[in-house]
Amino acid sequence: MSGRELKFLCVGFVVAAVLPALAAAATSPSLGADFERPSTVLQLAAMLYVPSLLFTLLFGFPYFAVARSFGRISWWSVTLAGFLSGSFFSMSFTGFRLFQPGWFMRDASSVFLTGVVGAASAVLAWVFWRAGAQPTVPSDANASRHLRG
């Protein structure tokens, strides 16, 4: 991986962690967000950013390393990995009630919502990584070498 790719990937993970922090702040009025004053939602999102970044790195970097070693990084694979990671995160807070009767009615919407946020966050990190993987402008030396065959 080039230094440029690594820089863009790191920026992608830092930016991708904003989505879960904002989603958690916006959907958790019990944490103190007052929707009459949007600044409280942003303050709460700022407080939730560090845990969101840690979780994003905890699940994102290992997935990226394994998938890259197999050459299997695509938009759909990161979307699936992000959805599963977000869903796992939600289930970890509900005590993994997945196998208890009535689980679906109680927890399915929150598991799905955090899965979607995780998927969006993963795709955002992937977009940054892809932007770093693409060369900006080919140099004249490379262009002439390709023309010669």
Image (cartoon, rainbow, N blue to C red):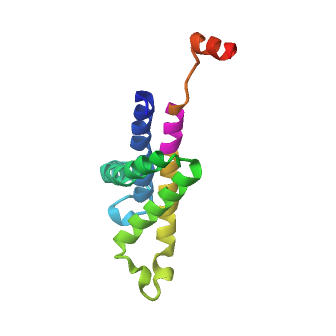
Against 90, residue 9 (above or below) is: above
Tell me the residue at 43%/54% (across/down).
20
Residue, far bottom: 101
The C terminus appears in which quarter of the rendering?
A: top right
- Count of labels in the image: 0
Against 52, residue 6 (above or below) is: above
In-front residue for pair 92/81:
81
Q: Image quadrant of residue 29?
A: bottom left
Where residue 4 appears, x then y in whole percent?
44, 28
Using the rendered image of the protein, determine whether residue 40 is visible from the camera's viewpoint: no
Q: Image quadrant of residue 6?
A: top left
Against 52, residue 138 (above or below) is: above
In-front residue for pair 148/133:
148
Secondary structure, magenta segment, majority class: helix
Instruction: Give the residues in magenta.
Output: 125-132
From the viewer's perspective, tell me whether residue 123 is left or right of residue 96.
right
In-front residue for pair 143/10:
143
Where residue 103 appears, x then y in whole percent?
46, 82
Tell me the residue at 40%/32% (across/down).
7
Tell me the residue at 58%/19% (across/down).
137
Where residue 78 appears, x then y in whole percent?
52, 52
Against 19, residue 104 (above or below) is: below
Where residue 83 appears, x then y in whole percent?
50, 60
Using the rendered image of the protein, determine whether residue 98 is visible from the camera's viewpoint: yes
The N terminus appears in which quarter of the rendering?
A: top left
Residue, far front: 149
Residue 131 in magenta stretch:
yes
Residue 42 in magenta stretch:
no
